[in-house]
Image: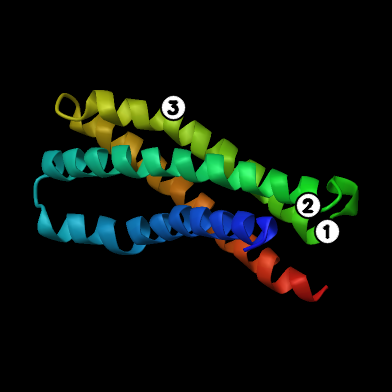
């Protein structure tokens, strides 16, 4: 396996974890939790526990994404040698990283602090997380589109 193939494999697996995980949260986990657990405190505690684990994986995925992406850019002659789709993917990835950073540094700690003591505040924090995860999911799908469709240009 070439270095490029190894880097691309790591890159794609990390992107699939992050974007796929967001899709699972939004389309399957949240609705199932709402259906199966009637009490808001139980739902909030479950989402806190899930997000703690998922966000730890996202941090690893981000490290792999940035390291592999920048290594592929460097091996490919630097930014000046990259096609527009690579610049677009990097710009979207930067935006996604900043959105995740806001979620992880600001909203998630609010959720953690409020679960068990202030269900309204915990619910508000979780609603904010949900909105930003929806934004990041849309951006992630756009990155996949740029990566795949952009190859033809």
Q: How far apart are labels 2 and 3 at the CA level?
A: 28 Å
Quadrant in which residue 46 is drawn: top left
Disc 2 residue crowd, few under 14, some 14–19, many 20+, Cα 10 Å = some
Residue under pointer 3: 106
Q: For mark 1, what is the residue?
A: 84
SS category of the residue bearing label 1: helix
Label 1 and label 3: CA atoms lie apart by 33 Å
Q: Which element is circle 2 on? A: helix
1 or 3: mark nearer the eye: 1
Task: Check if mark 2's residue and mark 1's residue have beta carbons within 8 Å.
Answer: yes
Q: Position of residue 143 (x, y in %)?
A: 63, 59
Q: Is residue 7 left or right of residue 127?
A: right
Using residue 87 as the reference point, say whether residue 29 is left or right of it: left
- Relative vertical location of residue 94 with respect to residue 120 in this rendering, above or below: below
CA gap between label 2 and label 1 equals 5 Å
Q: Quadrant of the N terminus?
A: bottom right
Q: Residue at x 39, y 43 (%)?
A: 57
Residue nearest the viewer, comparing 19 with 111: 19
Residue 113: x %, y % from top left? 26, 23
Closer to the N terminus: mark 1 or mark 3?
1
Q: Quadrant of residue 40?
A: top left
């Amino acid at each position: 396996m070439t270095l490029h193939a190894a880097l691309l494999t790591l890159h794609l697996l990390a992107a699939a974890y992050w974007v796929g995980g967001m899709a699972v949260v939004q389309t399957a986990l949240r609705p199932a939790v709402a259906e199966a657990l009637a009490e808001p405190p139980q739902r909030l505690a479950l989402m806190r526990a899930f997000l703690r684990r998922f966000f730890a994986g996202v941090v690893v995925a981000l490290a792999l994404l940035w390291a592999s992406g920048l290594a592929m850019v460097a091996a490919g002659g630097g930014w000046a040698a990259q096609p527009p789709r690579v610049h677009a993917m990097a710009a979207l990835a930067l935006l996604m990283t900043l959105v995740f950073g806001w979620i992880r540094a600001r909203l998630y700690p609010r959720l953690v602090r409020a679960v068990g003591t202030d269900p309204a505040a915990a619910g508000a924090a979780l609603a904010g997380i949900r909105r930003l995860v929806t934004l990041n999911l849309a951006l992630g799908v756009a990155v996949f589109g740029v990566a795949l469709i952009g190859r033809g240009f």
